[in-house]
Image (spheres, rainbow, N blue to C red):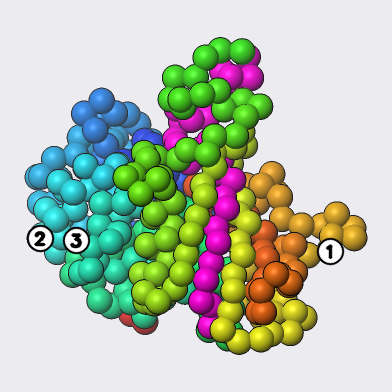
Amino acid sequence: MINKYDVAVVGATGVVGRMFLKVLEERNFPIKNFYAFASAKSAGTKITFSGKEYVVEELSEKSFDRHIDIALFSAGGETSKKYSPVAASKGVVVVDNSSAFRMDPDVPLIVPEVNPHAVKNHSGIISNPNCSTIQAVVALKPLHDKYKIKRIVYSTYQSVSGTGVKGVVDLEEGIKGNAPKIYPHPIAYNCLPHIDVFLDNGYTKEEMKMVDETKKIFDDQSLKITATTVRVPVYYAHSESINAEFENDFDIDELKGLLAGSPGIIVQDDPANCIYPLAINAAGRDEVFVGRIRRDYSVDYGVNLWVVADNIRKGAATNAVQIAELLISGK
């Protein structure tokens, strides 16, 4: 007999929250009782999950007084900081999609294809990494294991859905010629080298998330990493140019085979026939697509990759549900 679990989704009416529901349903997560929470503004909204209608409840400290095994949070950092510890104190395991706890040394930062073993180290809260970091480390993990990465250069091309519904609306309205409300400049027909706030070191917060989270997930502070993150006029799926330099030499065909045989990766690498990963094809998928795989001849042992994935699915909801699956598997 399959064990069933009491599951809550916090932020159930948002873009990622709604995707949590879809992915839980698609993957047949074994749910006994389901609860949906959101802000006062969204409380009372009716949602459908697994063929049953639920009324969204207003999130409060009393929300977790009932029995809940796992709560998936995607309601922003401040909400997570306030309510995740409350939930954890009442025996709930929180999988949090915000940045609130990612760099907390006591909170594991998990990508199931990369560091599933670390899930056991939780004390009630587990962090879901940044969307752009997740797809990058899935692609780099088998290469780091085999050839030992010493330096990474990230250049990202991130879709507007990463900003949420308001980002999508800014692009839609911009195409109509209307001024942006969320972005500092028009996003339609444009690229903005500006995701999140600028820090004192000249990098954006998004760029430093990629640097710091990669080191934490790989448990390797010796890695040299730099990043430039760019918002582009694409609705769904982030694309990344990744340059990795290894300590050891490699055979390019072996490297491609290694990627093709790794979990969660689909290699699309036939440039002669115009086959390479595209955001428009990755949207709606859970896999990480890798292509344009070629040696970097400017260094001794370097490779270039083009890595594309759906930022709302693998970059957020699917990864969180996979973490929940790890929790109930007992592995």
User: Residue 111, how many percent across, how many down?
Assistant: 43, 67
Q: Gap in Å between the C-alphas at discs 1 and 3? A: 47 Å
- Work out which quarter of the rendered image holds the C terminus and state it: bottom left
Residue 229 or residue 54, whichever sits in front = 229
Numbered label tally? 3
Residue that mark 3 sits on: 92
User: Residue 47, how many percent across, how many down?
Assistant: 38, 36
Give the class, few, some or many, for how many residues have Cα within 10 Å of label 2's Cα (few <14, many ≥20): some
Q: Gap in Å between the C-alphas at discs 2 and 1? A: 51 Å
Tell me the magenta residue range: 148-176
Element carrying mark 3:
loop
User: Residue 311, how many percent across, how many down?
Assistant: 52, 49
Q: Nearer the viewer, mark 2 or mark 1?
A: 1
Residue 255 or residue 85, whichever sits in front = 255
**Residue 178 against residue 297 in the figure, above or below:** above
State the residue at coordinates (10%, 44%).
61
Give the class, few, some or many, for how many residues have Cα within 10 Å of label 1's Cα (few <14, many ≥20): few
State the residue at coordinates (74%, 84%).
251
Badge 1 amino acid: Asp
**1 or 3: tag closer to the N-terminus:** 3
Magenta region includes residue 158: yes
Q: Which mark is residue 89?
A: 2
Badge 2 amino acid: Ser
**2 or 1: tag closer to the N-terminus:** 2
Give the class, few, some or many, for how many residues have Cα within 10 Å of label 3's Cα (few <14, many ≥20): many
Residue 273 in sight from this viewpoint: yes
User: Residue 84, how many percent across, how many down?
Assistant: 19, 53
Residue 24 in sight from this viewpoint: no
Magenta region includes residue 271: no
